[in-house]
Image: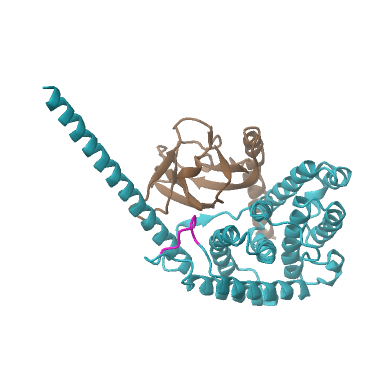
Chain colours: A cyan, B brown
Amino acid sequence: MKKSLISSIILSLFFISCGDGNQQSNDSSQEADVQEEFLKEESGEADMETETFILPSTLQIGTIFQRSGIGYIDGVVTDPSQIDAYVSKNAKLMNFGLYSADLAYCILNGQSQKSLEFLNAVKSLAEGIGYSSIFSDQNLYKRFEANIDNKDSVLNLLVEIQENTDVFVEGNSMHEQTYVIFAGAWVEGMYLGINAFNKENKGDIAKRLVEQMNIMTNLNKALESSERDLSDVDFVVDFLKDFENFYNNLESIRDENGIVNVREATIADEDIDKMSSMVKDLRNKIIAVS
Amino acid sequence: MRRLAILSLVFISLIFMAADSPCNWEDIKKTCEAELKPFKYYAFKVSRIDFGTESQFKEVQIPLFRDSEYRFIFNTSSLPEGIKIQIWNAPSRFEGRKLIYEAPQGEDIIVYDPPKTLFNNRIYLNYVIPASTKTELDQTSSGCVVFYSGFKH
């Protein structure tokens, strides 16, 4: 009886163990299927008609790279005194996004003086695109200036600026403008990430870059479907599409089954070099556009 | 002159319709803000819903970042009828997708903190909107869901 009980327990444990194994196998198989589905989405194979999406805040993009060991690199941000060079609305919108990313980068790295310079630049650009109300709310600009040496306070104010911008856009049905703004912020985020790439942090940064590519897929869809006249910044739209194709054709990001595992993905050094050169080239064109 | 009078009437009607809009999203968003701490604002989305004679479906993709924690807040208080709110790990066209969360029915404000292990780099909000139970549909058959979210590390 005792022997039979022990046998039953062993048998039960065997089945439980087999069951766990099957469960794990099912989970990883399901995970691979989901990844494959995401891949189809990113390559444009999947039908996206019923789906809408949100774009994340520029602050979180900055924060994500910050956690990958990005320190402040002197001279990497753009020149905040150049804002008068932007004449067209699209150039102003795109650089509003780009300068906002630089502002987040300076704040996250405790660069008080630079942060203030970028805050002034972002505020001027906001006025130029008709978004001045995002700063007038609750004396945000004055509070920012007064707290400039307190990183946490300033970060909270940056979040407030982001939320005010989102509210302003929703209230005025300006979603198509946000795609242009986000394009500038996204490119600058990638530029800052790529510039910080080194031997020590390359594994982590590569994973972050892979995450950013999913957002780029959404951004491309938004820009492609936009009814806004983007002819003066069409080089950005074209580049982002080419960049997406380049990324989707990278072998180094896929496992042996051709699947991109976002959590584990790596990018080969030569692919990073190529991406780096492409992003730097685009970023320099954006800050030079008028 | 007559055309001008008609246009004026249409314009005035539109103003009144806007004033009576059942989706006062700015006030609704404020109630969500109270639930956000200790997370920092991430994004919000207003989804307008017009109940009709047939059921409807809306899907919203939310990009997420690894190493971050998120809070999702849904406010359905402006909806005249109930809807189903679900969170999935993949889009609706994918048969093998997994349901991560389904909001309890009958609550105006729903707060959900998804465990990090349950999502990849994006999740999919599904709003399943049943056909209206009303026989006559009018302006009061509309409303909105406000999705408000925060993140922290």
Front residue of A111 and A80? A111
Front residue of B6 and A210? A210
Occupied quadrant, residue B2: bottom right
Q: Is residue B51 visible?
A: no
Front residue of A59 and A160? A59
Residue at 68 percent of width and 74 percent of height: A282
Q: How many marks?
A: 0
For residue B97, side relative to residue B33 (left or right): left
Q: Residue furthest front?
A: A3
Relative to A3, residue A149 above or below: below
Occupied quadrant, residue B75: top right
Q: Quadrant of the C terminus of chain B?
A: top right
Residue B36 image point, x, y percent: 63, 36
Magenta residues? Answer: A259-265
Residue A104 image point, x, y percent: 74, 54
Relative to A272, residue B152 above or below: above
Instruction: Give the dominant element type of the magenta stretch: helix, strand or loop.
Output: loop
Residue B7 image point, x, y percent: 66, 57
Residue at 22 percent of width and 38 percent of height: A14
For residue B79, side relative to residue A170 (left or right): left
Q: Is residue A6 visible?
A: yes
Residue A10 image point, x, y percent: 20, 33
Q: Quadrant of the N terminus of chain B?
A: bottom right
Q: Is residue A58 magenta?
A: no
